[in-house]
Image (cartoon, grey):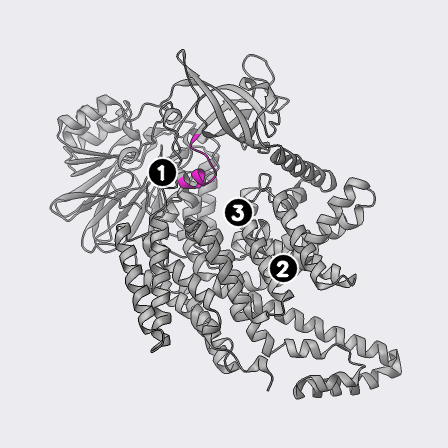
Amino acid sequence: MSSALKGRPWPRQPLLWAALAFSAGIVVGGHAWRPAWWWMLAIVVFVASAAYVVRKRTWLARSLALATLFMLGALNLQSRAPSGLVCPETSSLADGREVSILAHVVAEGNIQKVEFGGLRRRVDLETEQITFGGATIREKCGVRLGVYAKEPEQEDEAGASQRMRLFMYGERLRFIAKLRLPRNFRNPGAFDYESYLADNGIAVLASARAAQMEVLSGFAGNRWELWRTRLHRSVIQKIHALWPPAQAALIDAMVIGEEAFVERDERVNFQRSGTYHILVVSGMNVSILAAVIFGVLRRLRVNDVVSTVLTILLSADYAMLTSVGSPVWRAVLMMSLYLVTRLLYRQRSMLNALGAAALGLLVVDPRVLLGASFQMTFLSVFIIAAIGVPILERTSQPYQRGLRYLDQAGYDSSLEPRVAQMRLDLRMIGGRLARFVGNKVGLAALGGGGRGLLGACEILFISFLMQLGLSLPMAYYFHRATVVGIPSNALVVPLTGLLMPTAILAICVGYVSPLLARIPVLLASLALNGITGTVHFLGYQRIADLRVPTPELRVTLVALAALALAMILARRHLKLAGLGVTALLASALWLSLVRPAPKLRANVLEVTAIDVGQGDSILLATPAGKLLLVDAGGPVGGQQSQLDFGEDVVSPYLWSRGISRLDAVAVTHGHSDHIGGMRAILKNFRPRELWIGVIPPSEALSRLLQAAKEEGVAIVPHFRGDNFVFGGAMVRVLAPARGWQPAPRPGNNDSLVMHVIYGESSVLMEGDAERKVEQDIAAQQPRADLLKVAHHGGMTSSIPELLAAVRPRMAVISVGARNTFGHPRLEVLQRLEDLRAATYRTDVNGLVTFYLDGHSASAELAALH
């Protein structure tokens, strides 16, 4: 039996285990703070203990060494300064005042059309000076500026054109703007937008009209970066000159890392089909490009050393040219280490090289471990190197080697008996074929066909392993079970292998002759059409919409244990290797199909005001455990937003609670800040019922009702006088009246108002009801412990008569921080204070949960990390 079949014990990868121990320390250090002396003392104790037992008990010394690395990982994280940027003087101006800003461009953005007409561009700047009220501050601070303009054929109110100009790297700009601080939605499970911007050097946000931007003379910046950005933009322009707009947008993203032109729906299709890693420049793209470069050089008979060096250099040049940053550089590092280890004929040191790369990155910046990008890049390479390659080495690879040189019988002796026997059988078949095509052609066809078939099987197997191994981060970060990922990747990955080199060849040739570039453009277009066709077909399948809550800790630990077991058994007997893969499959099925129990308190009525900014979204959990979501947030007044509030804000919170299904949803009225996110909620949580009141003519409401019908959700209208039991709680509908005549457009007084009662405690939820409706509500005497204040605390609502009738002990106002409406109004807050009602606000307190136990009500603020 060959050495490849013998397996090797796990201690042969010490740097991999060292990296894993160091990583575990970083994770624990992020959740369990201890003084630095505590970690240092532990390190000294473990090092001394390891030194004492190293000669007597080697296994114990190794364990103590790993424990030392664990402590070092925790210490390394906790000894770092906080990642947030500090621009005290500039941040102090983010209070709504207008300031004059002098800054230079550090990151260009591309012009995009917005849904309701006009153009938008995002530009990152570094301030030089800010002038306000006769004073000037000079502080270098990162600003993300949104520049807006009407489309070229449109004009502003003064009749002046606001044509958008491309602002280039290093250009100095002066403009008037209002600064604002970035703010996270303060819900458990929310995306950490503040840290994301800080990692990109951004401390404050601003917006301005294109007509207000003044370009000054001079240059500020790095000449090398100027050259890089010009080359990057030139490539984008060339792509858009060679391909039509729809294809150019995808080529931008897949080849050069520019995602500005990719529509959100297209992104979702790639996510649903489990092929999102293809859409964005990632380790997969770098690996394909490196494989093509290396393969071409070897075909040209360039020796291994030169091929390796050129492949690394060209891959590094490609990484420099993209706009992706750290993720693609990490992929280049991993690929470079693999090529170097291959060059040294130390295939078995791949896991050591992977561990060394990870350990080096984590020592320099331990926070990189906490990001999804690093975890998925590392895990992808780990799955291939630690599980996939060892299994293929003992299954398909010997036959791949055996299918070469079929006409050379002397080659048989260097192969395993089973492979040599296969070659004899194929030569017999080739002899039969020789009558028709000749012996040489017949053997070549058999060998080439066999290698192609085995190659396809290897791609399927690696794709299968990748989907299983990545099921944990996909569930944790993206709440997706990519059940169609295996067939999708089996088709898309080979097509990407054709797309990447042909697209790059087309771009390079296009600089010389657009006519000559037509052939590689055509090949790239055919590959792209195959990719998008696969993505659309499989992504639109109902099963592709399987969304999963945040995995529980025990499920996470089981999935990690299955991954470790699969790695350990991959080099053992094939039956044991199969057992490891089966364990990995079982953990993936658990993550995808077994739903955790929602985190609810028994025998209480829970009312949670979710922070959706200037909008409403309320979760009710009844004493019997039924779940109702009232409204789902959305952009104010139909404004354009890059967020889907249902997908990006409300759903992550529900998933963090282990919620995978809702029993019912309700929309109080047709304004966008209440219904904007509801379509995503219908798709993600598939409620049984959608409760509505009156339906005025509205395109947005019509689309929502159509989406409900498509999802099989029953549409249930409710009007004043309806009383029914829902999950152990009594629901009284107080508005709208059955005869209510809505205006031609949705209005606040259309609101569905509900009084939900449990025992002697209750909550009144008003939507955005105003004075006229509140007078009718007050007449019904809806005494309540908790009041969801109407219309975000605006003056049109919360009239004294209503408050006198309700007499709430607690009140909650769903309102956006620093909103332009002045909500909540001081007069409304004063009325609530006069009633001695404890008032909570989502702009101040973030998400707030109230518990009504049938006798009283209590409040609890979210524990945010």
Q: Amino acid at mark 3?
A: Ser
Chain-order first, disc 1 or disc 3: 3
- Judging depth in this view, the residue of 531 and 769 nearest the camera is 531
Instruction: Check residue 612 in the rendering and tell me which mark sits there, or answer none.
Output: 1
Q: Residue 187, position in %: x, y? A: 32, 43
Q: Which residue is mark 2?
A: 493
Q: Secondary structure at mark 3?
A: helix
Let me know if residue 262 appears in the view.
yes
What residue is shown at x 47% (from left), y 65% (from top)? 15
Q: Which segment is the magenta one? A: 195-204
Chain-order first, disc 2 or disc 3: 3
> Label 2, label 3: how many angstroms apart (C-alpha)?
23 Å
Vertical arrangement, residue 556 with respect to residue 144, above or below: below
Kindly indicate whether the residue at mark 3 contacts the one at mark 1 (C-beta within 8 angstroms).
no
Whether residue 93 is in magenta: the answer is no
Locate the N terminus by quadrant: bottom right
Let me know if residue 514 appears in the view.
no
Q: Residue 322, position in %: x, y? A: 61, 44
- Judging depth in this view, the residue of 307 and 700 nearest the camera is 307
Q: Amino acid at mark 1?
A: Val
Q: Amino acid at mark 2?
A: Val
Crowd class of label 2 (few under 14; some 14 to 19; many from 20; radius 10 Å): many
> Label 2, label 1: how many angstroms apart (C-alpha)?
38 Å
Q: Which residue is mark 3?
A: 326
Vertical arrangement, residue 714 with respect to residue 596, above or below: above
Q: Residue 500, position in %: x, y? A: 68, 52
> Label 1, label 3: how many angstroms apart (C-alpha)?
31 Å
